[in-house]
Image (spheres, helix red, strand yellow):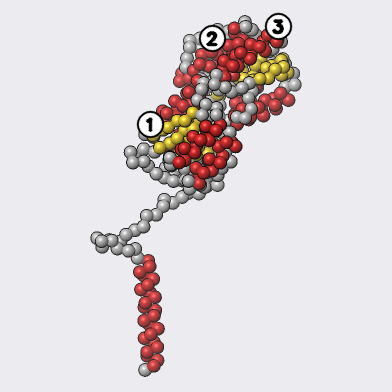
């Protein structure tokens, strides 16, 4: 009898444990008698380049809210970049806000904080300084807000950086200049430090000056202001007065189209058309200056700024939709030379008809 009682007790314990396990595995039932299934997050695809989780949210109006924070929007190149972002936002039905810091680093950091506090769905960054932006970007990523940055290096896991391949652009332009000058002559270098793309271009400049020892830098200046083109023009006029004779200066290396525009105007107004200008970046205004009769602006390495802006936005939207996007995205620049251009005035949209591969980066 005792043995039977023990067996019954053991059987009862086993039965209770099995029932408890089954209850644990079953979801609770709702008032309609149907099981309630807890919400689960979407599966995350992990890559070596981008492993930060992203907050996926859509606003009540059905639109993603994206903030673009720009160090500056002055200049025609920047304007065409902004138009590209706007065009992409319109196509995608995105609620886009744009904040222009007007070259004020503290404002840029403040705008970034505001975007985070407003719980935007994603953030685009255009230029800026690493030390200024990195703390705020880390907070954004921690909050699940993805960031795609253009022309600024941010060492934050999960951030995608877009650039125009500044090393290649500098190599293209400087190589063309060295070939046109047969590797010899005095040159003027227009440069401003502190900007990631400019620093990269400067590295290539130093290498190329070592490669062509016959090129001699006789003057260097440059600054980023509210009217960089006009300020460059005034300073270039002073340089030309310091070197008044033809042959004193063979060329100007201007690795920003605002620099190239200012230098070109100064050279033309001084009647010094023998001086050649080589640059980086193009816009409608710069393109038309290259087409002018006897223009000193001979070549510029560039990518379509509108395509850059639209691609940056689309990468962010891809990230928000759960797609894996690369840690780095570099455009393939193209060297545009004066002799490729027609006599009639054209704009950037028409450039692909005359310059091979110009449209290969377009969306």
In the image, 340 versus 309, the foreground residue is: 309
Tell whether label 2 touches label 3 (CB within 8 Å): no
Q: What residue is at 49 percent from the left and 28 percent from the top?
A: 100
The nearer-to-camera label among 3 and 1 is 3
- Looking at the rendered image, the quarter that the N terminus falls into is bottom left
Q: Is residue 224 left or right of residue 218?
A: left
Tell whether label 1 touches label 2 (CB within 8 Å): no
Inter-mark Cα distance, 3 to 2: 24 Å
Which is more N-terminal, label 2 or label 3? 3
x and y, in percent, of residue 255 in the image: 61, 22
Q: What residue is at 54 percent from the left and 43 percent from the top?
A: 138
Q: What residue is at 73 percent from the left and 25 percent from the top?
A: 210
x and y, in percent, of residue 272 in the image: 64, 7
Q: What residue is at 47 percent from the left and 17 percent from the top?
A: 347
Inter-mark Cα distance, 3 to 1: 54 Å
Query: Helix, strand, or loop for circle 1?
Result: helix
Q: Is residue 168 above or below residue 39?
A: above
Camera sees residue 259: yes
Inter-mark Cα distance, 2 to 1: 35 Å
Query: Helix, strand, or loop for circle 2?
Result: loop
Badge 1: residue crowd in 10 Å (few <14, some 14–19, many ≥20): few
Dot label at residue 220: none
Residue at the left extreme, as displayed: 32
In the image, 315 versus 97, the foreground residue is: 97
Dot label at residue 91: 1
Which is more N-terminal, label 1 or label 2? 1
The nearer-to-camera label among 3 and 2 is 3
Dot label at residue 292: 2
Dot label at residue 245: 3
Residue 289: name its quadrant.
Answer: top right
């Amino acid at each position: 009898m005792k043995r039977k009682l023990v067996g019954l007790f053991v059987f009862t314990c086993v039965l209770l444990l099995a029932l408890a396990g089954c209850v644990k595995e079953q979801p609770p039932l709702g008032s309609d008698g149907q099981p309630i299934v807890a919400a689960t997050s979407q599966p995350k695809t992990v890559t070596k380049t981008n492993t930060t989780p992203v907050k996926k949210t859509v606003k009540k109006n059905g639109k993603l809210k994206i903030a673009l924070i720009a160090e500056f929007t002055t200049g025609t190149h920047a304007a065409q970049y902004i138009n590209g972002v706007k065009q992409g936002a319109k196509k995608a039905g995105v609620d886009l806000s744009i904040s222009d810091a007007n070259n004020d680093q503290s404002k840029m950091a403040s705008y970034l904080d505001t975007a985070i506090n407003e719980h935007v769905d994603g953030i685009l960054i255009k230029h800026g300084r690493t030390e200024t932006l990195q703390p705020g970007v880390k907070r954004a990523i921690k909050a699940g807000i993805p960031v795609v940055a253009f022309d600024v290096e941010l060492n934050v896991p999960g951030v995608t950086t877009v650039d125009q391949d500044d090393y290649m652009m500098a190599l293209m332009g400087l190589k063309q200049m060295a070939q046109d000058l047969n590797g010899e002559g005095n040159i003027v270098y227009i440069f401003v430090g502190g900007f990631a793309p400019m620093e990269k271009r400067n590295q290539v400049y130093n290498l190329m000056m070592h490669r062509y020892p016959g090129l001699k830098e006789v003057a260097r200046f440059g600054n980023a202001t509210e009217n960089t083109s006009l300020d460059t023009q005034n300073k270039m006029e002073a340089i030309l007065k310091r070197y008044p004779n033809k042959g004193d200066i063979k060329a100007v290396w201007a690795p920003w189209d605002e620099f190239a525009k200012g230098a070109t105007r100064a050279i033309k107004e001084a009647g010094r058309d023998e001086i050649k200008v080589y640059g980086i970046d193009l816009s409608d205004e710069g393109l038309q200056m290259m087409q002018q009769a006897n223009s000193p602006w001979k070549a510029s390495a560039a990518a379509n700024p509108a395509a850059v802006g639209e691609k940056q936005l689309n990468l962010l939207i891809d990230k928000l939709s759960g797609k894996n996007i690369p840690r780095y995205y570099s455009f393939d620049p193209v060297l545009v030379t004066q002799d490729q251009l027609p006599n009639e005035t054209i704009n950037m949209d028409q450039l692909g008809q005359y310059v091979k591969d110009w449209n290969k980066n377009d969306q």
